[in-house]
Amino acid sequence: MLTTSLAAPPSPPSPLSARRRWTVLAVCALSMFLVGVDTTIVNVGLPEIGHGLDVGTRGLEWVVNAYTVVLAGLFIVSGALADRFGRRRVFQCGLLVFGLASLACALAPSLGVLVAARAVQGVGASMLSPVALAIVVNAMPDPRERARAIGVWASVFGLSMAAGPVTGGGLIAAFGWRSVFWINAPVVVAALVLVAVFVPESRAERARRLDLPGQVLLTVVLGLFVGVLIEGPGIGWASPVALTGYALIAAASAGFVLVELRRHEPLMDLGLFRRPPFATAVLGAMAVFVALNVSLLLNTLYLQQARGWTPLASGAATLPMALGATLCAPWSGVLVGRLGPRRPLILAGTFLTAGGLCLTNLDQHTSVPLILLAHLLIGVGFGFANAPLTNTAVSGLPLSRAGVAGAITSTARQVGAAVGIALAGGLVAGAGPTGLAAASHPGWLLVAACGLFLFVVARASQPATVRTRRPGQERPLRVRAGRGQGHRRGPHDMSR
């Protein structure tokens, strides 16, 4: 969801006053907050949703992943639509779709309806976060001001983590699980009014062509991959249905690669993966979100089902994680600007690994201080990770390719979220309250392994070298987060 290290192309001075520009930031950040809160607020409510609709763990995984898979699949194309048809217009459409889908979730009489409504929520959310960031960048042409704005934007995700579980727990305790969807309605109405009043319309000077075949194949690949992960433990990994799923995933993936290699303006520039720093950064972004979502789901199920905590208490237990992420995200941007991405990545890997290892022997009587310490360490690692991962992905690229690189990295984060939910749910599916802690041990080892992988990303992250240019050749991009003077301007579609 965060592309925190990129900037916009050269543009004429903004006619907006300083107060109006920062109002635009506040309004657009509200969408980021809404998308982030909706993920964590639903997470803490999963056990209650299961009781209310009489579904098990695998069904609950679809409640989360129907949202994240659609969000990941449409992330890039929503930015292209906004560039073509107008960012404010697409943003307003996203709010409307998200709000109506939230009402459908609140009224859902069955699991199937809830999952379908969550998928439509993902469609709306895909038009919010990336498009809103493009609006902010367009409204702030000054690099220094834009750097501060993007720093604020990066911190919003940590705040949404803090608000989601606690707010969700309180709402569920007072009004039941459906209230976590009802709460979206007044926020969406307020956002629609504020956007209409304060946000100017903007478009790209040159909109990218839509790659519909690539979009369809990407969505099919993601849906099949996550579906097999969720249903695999139930149907059997070697069953005919699973084997058919593997074959379809392979065929759709091959088709996607062939289509993208032949397109003049592909959905994804696959040539970027030939660069080891970019490839490892994309995998690192995925790993960080795998770790985060494994931690959140295992925490929710363990505390509520194995320890008997209320939703409000289990939500409050994530506050150290949210605090660490909120405080360390801006600090990480400063460190990247001063020292480059390697040291923040090492810090991220160290804290994430330590947090996972703290809970590898989790049992029914593990002390609460140890659980809270583990959450704090994971949150600190998550906070340090985002800025250097984006920096590593785009460093050394020409300007015209940096926006696509940032979009792929953001998509990888959402894929990691879906995979993390699927893996965590598969580990504890069928485990009773007394066996859930032991069943979660591989999940905490996976969190630690994701942290260790960040050391590989740190090793691959190299400062971009200044290469000599032939006449007309573009200069490689060097991105530094945290200081305005360190920002190089990226393409218009950086937000995707």
Image (cartoon, rainbow, N blue to C red):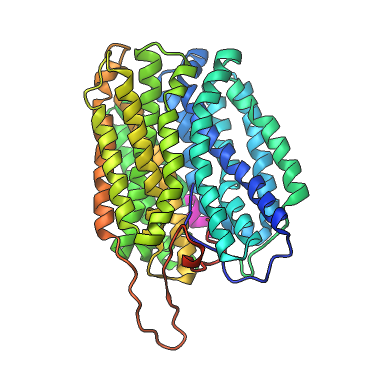
Label the magenta part by its dominant secondary structure.
helix
Q: Is residue 52 toward the left or the right of residue 298 in the image?
A: right
| Left or right: 195 in relation to 30 | right
The reply to whether residue 171 is in sight is: yes
Residue 211 lies in the magenta stretch: yes
Magenta includes 155?
Answer: no
Instruction: Look at 53% across and 36% down and name the residue there.
Output: 160
Q: In this view, does 431 lie above or below 157?
A: above
Image quadrant assignment for residue 429:
top left
Whether residue 229 is visible here, answered yes or no, is no
Which residue is depicted at the point 68% across and 36% down?
Answer: 188
Instruction: Out of 441 and 357, give the one closest to the viewer.
Output: 357
* 245 and 274: which is toward the camera: 274
**Looking at the picture, how far across and down is residue 406, in whole percent?**
45, 58
The single residue placed furthest to the right in the displayed view is: 197
Taking the view exactly as shown, the residue that stands out farthest to the left is: 361
* Residue 248 spot, x, y in % from top left: 36, 44
How many numbered marks appear?
Answer: 0
Which region is colored magenta? 209-216
